[in-house]
Amino acid sequence: MFQIKQTYSSLILLIVLFLSGQYAEGQSLESDAVERKFQVQLDKPSYLPLEPIVVEFSANLKHTDAKPVFGRDVTMTVFSDGQVREAGSIGPTEEPAVQLPSNLRQFSLGVSKPDEVVSYRGVIAVTLASEYLSAPGTYQLQFFLHTSGSKIASEVVTVSVDSPKGVDLKAFRFLTKEKGTTSFDWVWKQKDGVRVLSRFVDEFAGSVYSDYAILYLGNVQLAKNEVDAAQKQFEKITNNSNSYLSENAKRNLDEIERRKSRAVDLPQ
């Protein structure tokens, strides 16, 4: 009789331990569901001096976290030749990240509930790289997303900067003369800035810098409400392999379409 009771007690203990293990596993999954993650991917392994570094960011954040603006909320650290250099916000874009559709997460008891992780994606052309990656060589980059009082680190990525040649070298020398940046901000500061930028697009077509010039020229023309001229520029780069350029061009073409539709709907 005592042996039967002992066997029964052992069986109860095993059931309790099993259920405890199941509960612990469910708690672990719950914890994983709210783990923040931040990942980066460069569009290519090597660049030229002054060429913007195109980075695709993806982040899994808590649903209570603020929607990130990668250009504002991400900082960069550059490692090279034993030196560590801290950069500020990678900017200049202030556009919010794109929120991806949420998924359902399966828990151990077979119950589905909305995932507590919210995923975001964004593509940024890091123009401040011209300051921190100005000379040919190999660099390691690490990005940090600042959100809700937390600083989330990406993995370290390696990028090389090569010496420009041919048309790239000619375009590089031109840009160095014009303040040494591919942000093209000098267009607004110079009286003939738009004309100079248009000449740059024509003279240095095929260089790694020219498509950025096309995008900027289109933005300037759109800001001046020269819609048809801007449309021609954006259409040149809609199929560009550079996702930053193609996505911005398509977004601007959508804006042009909206403007034209509003103009048609206005009473004559």
Image (cartoon, rainbow, N blue to C red):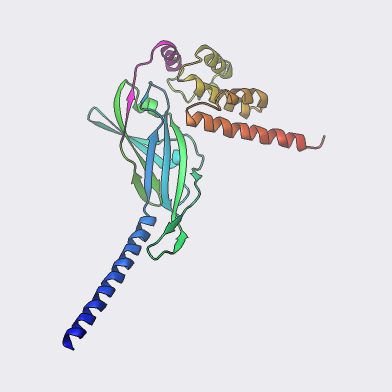
Instruction: State the residue in front, 119 or 225.
Output: 119
Q: Quadrant of residue 153?
A: top left
Q: Is residue 55 visible?
A: yes
Quadrant that contains the C terminus: top right
Does the rendering let one see residue 186?
no
| Viewer-side residue, 181 vs 40 | 40
User: Where is 247 relative to 214, above or below?
Assistant: below
Residue 41, position as x, y percentages in the image: 39, 36
Location of residue 213 in the rendering, given as x and y in whole percent from the top left corner: 52, 22
Q: Which residues are magenta?
A: 157-176
| Residue shown at the point (36%, 53%) measured from the top left | 35
Is residue 73 shown above or below 197?
below
| Quadrant assignment, res 112 | bottom left
Q: Is 226 rendered above or below residue 17? A: above
Determine whether, in the image, residue 84 is placed left or right of residue 171.
left
Q: Residue furthest right?
A: 268
Q: What residue is shown at x 56% (from left), y 28% (from top)?
A: 238
Left/right of residue 40 with respect to residue 188 in the rendered view: left
Identify the residue at horizontal 54%, vertical 18% (top origin): 197
* Residue sitting nearer the eye, 20 or 67: 20
- Nearest the viewer among 159 and 76 is 159
Indicate yes or no whether the magenta region holds residue 64: no
Tell me the residue at 41%/22% (across/down).
50
